[in-house]
Image: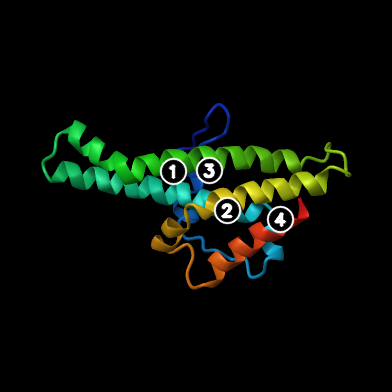
Amino acid sequence: DKVPFESPFGTINVLQDYHHILGWKFTAISVEDCMDSSVPLAAYKWLVCYLLRESDLKLSKEKQAGLSDFEAKNNCQVYYCRSLAIAFIEQTVLQRYHDYTHDPSIPPALQPVLKNLSALYGLWSLSKHLAVLYQGGYASGEQPSRLIQNAILELCYRV
């Protein structure tokens, strides 16, 4: 509730913009836009915030239905919390790799390859969450999934 917080490794600092992030949409309009890991990284930030909100709503509904804490948490874990945990660690890995590949100390000859690998990992991992991205309204229409698929193929070719 507007109280600033920080985690030791900065992994949850993104949640300070939780409400703002939930308003984000998929904005890439070309395969070339997807060649930077910032595209899947933005999607992961939204995904983590969305799954966190949905997990909280599911837990509240289960408790309101009269289930015990154990049963409510168990029911919430199946789709929401499990997916949240996976998305969170994937986002954390991608954030670290993105930061590393955009560090000016990286030799210029290595940057293109490392950036391609970062984008490839991000898009490939994100493709497993496409249903949730559509379900939550981050992505709509055919274009986002096609762009992601075509970008993955292009990045595989480049690597």
Task: Name the mark on residue 149.
Answer: none
Separation of disc 4 and disc 2 at Cα? Answer: 19 Å
Q: Distance between the residues labelled 3 and 4?
A: 27 Å
Residue at image location 18% in from the left, 35% down from the top: 71
Can you say which quadrant of the picture contains the N terminus?
A: top left
Q: Quadrant of residue 108?
A: top right
Task: Compare marks 3 and 4 and give the one earlier in the sequence.
Answer: 3
Q: Which residue lies furthest to the left in this view?
A: 66
Q: In x, y percent, where is residue 64?
A: 15, 45
Residue 9: percent from left, percent from top: 58, 29
Residue 30 percent across, percent down from the top left: 67, 69
Tag shown at residue 42: 2
Residue type, mark 1 in image: Lys
Mark 2 or mark 1: whose residue is earlier in sequence = 1
Residue position marked by numbered label 4 in the rendering? 155
Q: Which of marks 3 and 4 is in front?
A: 4
Q: Circle 4 — which element?
A: helix
> Residue 72: x and y, percent?
21, 38
Q: Is residue 23 left or right of residue 157?
A: left
The residue furthest top is 8
